[in-house]
Image (cartoon, coloured by chain):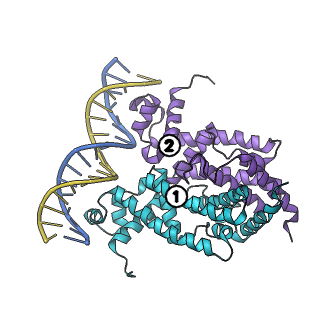
Chain colours: A cyan, B purple, C yellow, D blue
Amino acid sequence: MPAQTSTRDRVLSAYEELLINEGPRGATLDAVTALAGVSKGGLLYHFKNKEALAAGVVERLKELAAADLEQMRTDPEGPSRYLVRTSVYVGSPLDRALIAAVRLAQCSDPAASDLLQQIHRDWFDLVFHEVGDRAIARAIMLLGDGLYYNEGLPGGWPQQENSPTSGPVEELLEIVDRLKALTPAGRP
Amino acid sequence: MPAQTSTRDRVLSAYEELLINEGPRGATLDAVTALAGVSKGGLLYHFKNKEALAAGVVERLKELAAADLEQMRTDPEGPSRYLVRTSVYVGSPLDRALIAAVRLAQCSDPAASDLLQQIHRDWFDLVFHEVGDRAIARAIMLLGDGLYYNEGLPGGWPQQENSPTSGPVEELLEIVDRLKALTPAGRP
DNA sequence: GTCTATATGTTGATAGAC
DNA sequence: GTCTATCAACATATAGAC
């Protein structure tokens, strides 16, 4: 694993960046070549067409998500808190790959859609196993989803710095704890 | 207000439909003309360019959202329950206009972004006024956001019919009630 | 108000030199 | 492995007939 990123990796990251910031529309081959500092021929040597580029993003996400799932499974605070904690966009490689894949899925990329659905299901399984109640688990998932889309997707519900709906994660984690505590009393 | 939809309205609806189902990429003028059953010249008579088409979607959303906000303000169950209840995508004109605008915002349409942000802020203000606690209000908003994105955006976290994370709204509304009830005890 | 025809620019992809 | 042409396909937009 060289610290020196390969051209292939640079191209892939540039494509991710453009998917995130400009959307699928702006992520043209020309734009990718410009951002990656490579010619069109150079790009197409590594990825024979645009479809292969998208497949590269999906493959990268698959690996990052697998590692993250293991983190979530073994986190000392438990999967629910881990999920919400890590649902605020910080621009990590996983964050970027996830958002890029969401963009691809929005343009009807079946591989991206399938993987995102799988990831989402994996998360739910861990949360459900922890809290024991489907509705509560669902609510916690939605909290995370809302966070991801709100603060991760430029142009979702576009947020300004001090938007009333943004704020510290801690207050949300406290809500998560209360939701978890609600579970036993959940059946009247 | 004729029940017979004008060509202009048909064009606008076709553009919305394509934004939702095919994404901004697939919402080409040709596709719009095909779906609306009008020629390119006919379309461009009503909207002189693509930017005007997008502005038309934003304008339509503005009107629908204003009417919806009034509903939310006066709903007998209160704004929070109204928000979550109506955050499940049912394909209403408002739903469609909202998702279409989200797509536009994702492709860096400033007018769409601004309006979406304003709508989101209006919702939050009502919810916050009802529950009195910023963190709880934020959690309820995120619940709604997650719902919207999950079940409204094709390709978000793509859901199958009986996905573990989908389910009846009622159970979520119960969670909302419990969140609201949490408020007084919220300060330890 | 709606149509056809056409101009102009982009985009994805190929061929072949270095 | 990377580059420079170059092309066919498609997108937006205009002009003008009906």
Viewer-proximal residue, A87 or A155?
Answer: A87
Point out the image quarter for the N terminus of chain B. Answer: top right
Residue occupying the point 30% across, 68% down? A38
Q: Amino acid at mark 2?
A: Asn
Instruction: Give the percent coordinates (x, y) of residue A186.
Output: 81, 57
For the residue carrying disc 1, how many other residues have a C-alpha within 10 Å: few (<14), some (14-19), or many (20+)? many
> Seen in the image, is A69 located left or right of residue A163?
left
Viewer-proximal residue, B90 or A158?
Answer: B90
Instruction: Give the percent coordinates (x, y) of residue B147.
Output: 65, 51
The answer to whether residue A103 of the structure is visible from this angle is no
**Labels 1 and 2 positioned on one and the same chain:** no
Q: Which residue is mark 1?
A: A116
Q: Nearer the viewer, mark 1 or mark 2?
A: 1
Residue occupying the point 61% across, 47% down? B162
Q: Is residue A167 above or below residue B165?
A: below
Instruction: Give the percent coordinates (x, y) of residue A127.
Output: 66, 64
Viewer-proximal residue, B112 or A180?
Answer: A180
The answer to whether residue A13 of the structure is visible from this angle is yes
Q: Amino acid at mark 1?
A: Leu
> Seen in the image, is A114 located left or right of residue A75?
left
Dot 2: element:
helix
Point out the image quarter for the C terminus of chain B. Answer: bottom right
Q: Which residue is mark 2?
A: B21
Q: Is residue A172 above or below residue D9?
A: below
Dot 1: element:
helix
For the residue carrying disc 2, how many other residues have a C-alpha within 10 Å: few (<14), some (14-19), or many (20+)? some
Which label was assigned to residue A76? none
Instruction: Give the percent coordinates (x, y) of residue B103.
Output: 53, 49
Q: Chain of mark 1?
A: A
Distance from the alpha carbon under mark 1 to that under mark 2: 18 Å
Q: Is residue B56 above or below residue A52?
A: above
Residue occupying the point 49% across, 33% down? B11
